[in-house]
Amino acid sequence: MVKTAGACGSKTPPPAEIRRSNVLRDRLDAVRQFRLGSKKQATKNLADSPHLFAERRRFTQPYLCIPSVVSETRNFFTAARLDAETISSNLVFNAEDPDGYLFGIVSSSMFITWQKTIGGRLESRLRFSNTVVWNNFPLPEVSEKLRAEIIAGGQAVLDARNLHPERCLADHYNPLAMSPQLLAAHRKLDKAVDRAFRQKPFNSNEERLETLLKSYLKMTEQDALIKTKRRR
């Protein structure tokens, strides 16, 4: 299940770093003063720990971080996998993803095709939703073998990104400047995710969309049938 957490990845600085940095001390003091001025007692009580988020959803294992909004020019959704020590803000969605399977799914052409069709927009940008987009994504059950291939495909994407650690996600996914290694990794991932829907390769995202809609129709018909049987 994908939940709002709250940009991807910020960590609490160690005490020694706070002590050495005037910028950090000023920022933390500003947070403390802001909390003290709140009308809510619960917020005032947090003034003694300005270095901590007021609301934290902590994970005990690696998790998937999904931005709530990405550029409409993306050919792939720019998600990330984060370690359990990294705290996300309220601008992203999170889901436990210990083996990277969800990362592989979200990073596929199949998923961004669904996102561009079903998801909302912020101006022209793509707006992710855990209820509208994620919960309705008609992903069939996959075999353990195919699941392992999708996980491996997702890891290949991460490995390709790591070849250029100086690049942020926006640089990695500039459609005019994607590295050949990253593009090749995504194509390999696509082949695995596509086989969850059919064995015959897709020639375009239009073909993917047609299959997605058929899969969604099948899924909703099955749900309706189950509900009908329960009422009897």
Image (tube, rainbow, N blue to C red):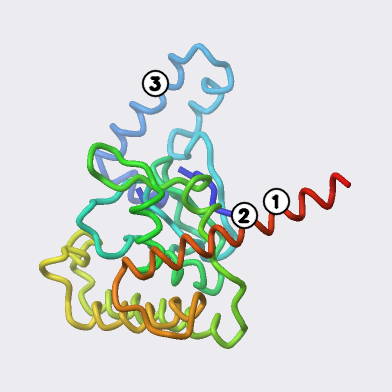
Q: Which residue appears farthest toward the left when viewing the image?
A: 176
125 vs 27: above or below: below
> What residue do we see at 37% from left, 42% from top?
120
> What residue do we see at 26% from left, 83% from top?
184
> What residue do we see at 24% from left, 78% from top?
183
Q: Secondary structure at mark 1?
A: helix
Per the rendering, the mark at residue 34 is 3
Q: Please, what is the three-letter code of the amino acid marked with disc 3?
A: Phe
Q: Secondary structure at mark 3?
A: helix
Q: Nearer the viewer, residue 225 or 69?
A: 225
- The crowd level at tag 1 (other Cα within 10 Å; few <14, some 14-19, many 20+) is few
Between marks 3 and 2, how big is the CA–CA gap? Answer: 48 Å
Q: Quadrant of the N terminus?
A: bottom right
Per the rendering, the mark at residue 224 is 1
Q: Please, what is the three-letter code of the amino acid marked with disc 1?
A: Ala
Q: Secondary structure at mark 2?
A: helix
Between marks 1 and 3, how big is the CA–CA gap? Answer: 50 Å
Q: Which residue is mark 2?
A: 220
